[in-house]
Image (cartoon, helix red, strand yellow):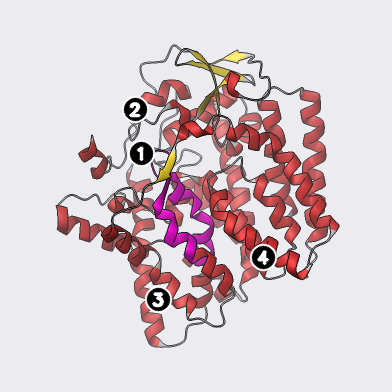
Amino acid sequence: MAILVAFFALDNVLLLGFLGRPPLVVWALALLLPSLLGFAAYRLTSAPCRISLPTILVCFLVAAALLILGGEGRLFYAPTDWQVRDAVLADMGRYRWPFDYWLDGRSQMLRAPIGMYLIPALLGGVSQFGRDWMLLAQNSLILGLLFALGSTLFEGRRARWIALIVFVMFSGLDVLGNLIVQSATGEVRWDHIEDWGAGYQYSAHITQLFWVPQHALAGWAVALVYLLWRRNLVPIGIFGAILPLVALWSPLILFGTVPFALFAALRVLGSRSWNWLDISTCLIATAASAAALVYLSTDSAAVGGGLRPPTAILYLLIMLFEVTPFLLPVLHDRNNGVDRTSLAIAAVCLFLMPSWSIGMFNDFQTRASIMPLAILAVAYADWATRIAGWREKVGFGVVIVLGSFTGVIGIANALRFAPTPIPHCSVAGIWERQSTSHPPHSSYFAARDAFPFSIVAVDRVSSIHQRQCWDRPWRGPARPFFELRGR
């Protein structure tokens, strides 16, 4: 737990270097703040809970294998979202910090959740190979830690294996939604079946990990610390500290954490189950994250958002295939390790989230839902470890098999498409050449003079872009049919 907290804290400190703060100050804080928060987490986590070495090794091996299949390390195909992500990592490694872009007639800076890239860009060396493998090493460490800490929620080897399989393959019944769309319209895609909901989506865990690992790891970290707090394995101070620290990885997941954070605050205030070490840890974490919170909020209104509910029929199908198959069994389970209040909060979040949208691709629903979905997945896995009747076992098997189609197709794509090529263009150069989308620049950039603090760019990304951003075509699943019809 100390390593996990210190790692996220270090990213927040390195952001200061990315924004041009004095190197001596950045390095001093990089030595002080992560160590202080890590020590506080170590002292606060006093529960007598030990994880065996074989469990830790298995967790790290599974984590590395999943991330490699997702395209990290460039041994297998990576989804097309990585076209921009690769370029971000390349720019952050090639250019001196802080650097800017000349876009739309003005100096602009990267304003994006760049927490995942800071350490690989800094330590990966001058080559893309080094940065790729440093990214793989970093994410394997974090995901392995999450799996290892998550194993403490289950007792016995059998229960832990069931929980691991259920969590990794957790997905809605997208195959049924795809079949309905195919029968109704004759148009459907089977290489990424989550697109059946016309943009409304609760992403499978394999999809989250393969397409957007920065959001997945941040959301799962918050969900895990929350569940450990509910089991009295960690105090409230660690949960309060992890919330601002992960914002630089995924600000969108914080929307889904707000109801849980409010419940936790009311619970500890009512029971007085807190101390000054909890308060000081939260304050230090918030102070360490202050620059990141300001950075992420700069000109963020340009991204856009608002009410965008689906049609009644589509909403009912989403709830029927994505939520209720998992929610009904765990709500009837009186002995579940996840408390009913947390399950009720998760259910309300999942029922309401399709009605709101942020950005042009409904990122609010797909990313803010990561924490409530993770809590639901853990509860479903806990129920699965204790079912005894044959009807429950058959029902569990049907849901898991149907849901696993989504993840299996994602893994199949990794195996049937060629490994992704090394990028040659900057983020600005690749922006209009993406094969799946052309979002506005405000999604990843903000004007340099819009930041509330002074930034003096010492390097500028060339505005002269190469004709070819990759040595060979970045092949993959076709564009979703509902986007084609709307163009």
Q: Secondary structure at mark 3?
A: helix
Give the labeled residue for mark 4.
228
Q: Nearer the viewer, mark 4 or mark 1?
A: 4
Q: Which residues are magenta?
A: 347-376
Say whether disc 1 or disc 2 marks the residue closer to the N-terminus.
Answer: 1
Say whether disc 3 or disc 4 marks the residue closer to the N-terminus.
Answer: 4
Cα separation, mark 3 vs mark 2, equals: 43 Å
In the rendering, which numbered label is found on residue 324?
Answer: none
Give the labeled residue for mark 1.
418
Residue 368 lies within the magenta run: yes
In the displayed structure, 26 sits above or below 231; it is above
Percent of width and height locating residue 299: 54, 29
- Residue at 67% across / 32% down in the picture? 15
Give the labeled residue for mark 2.
472
Kind of residue at badge 1? Ala
Q: Secondary structure at mark 2?
A: loop
Cα separation, mark 3 vs mark 4, equals: 25 Å
Residue neighbourhood size for the residue with mark 4, other residues' Cα within 10 Å, grouped as few (<14), some (14–19), many (≥20): many
Q: Can you see residue 470?
A: no
Q: Nearer the viewer, mark 3 or mark 4?
A: 4
Q: Secondary structure at mark 4?
A: helix
- Residue at 57% across / 32% down in the picture? 131
Give the labeled residue for mark 3.
396
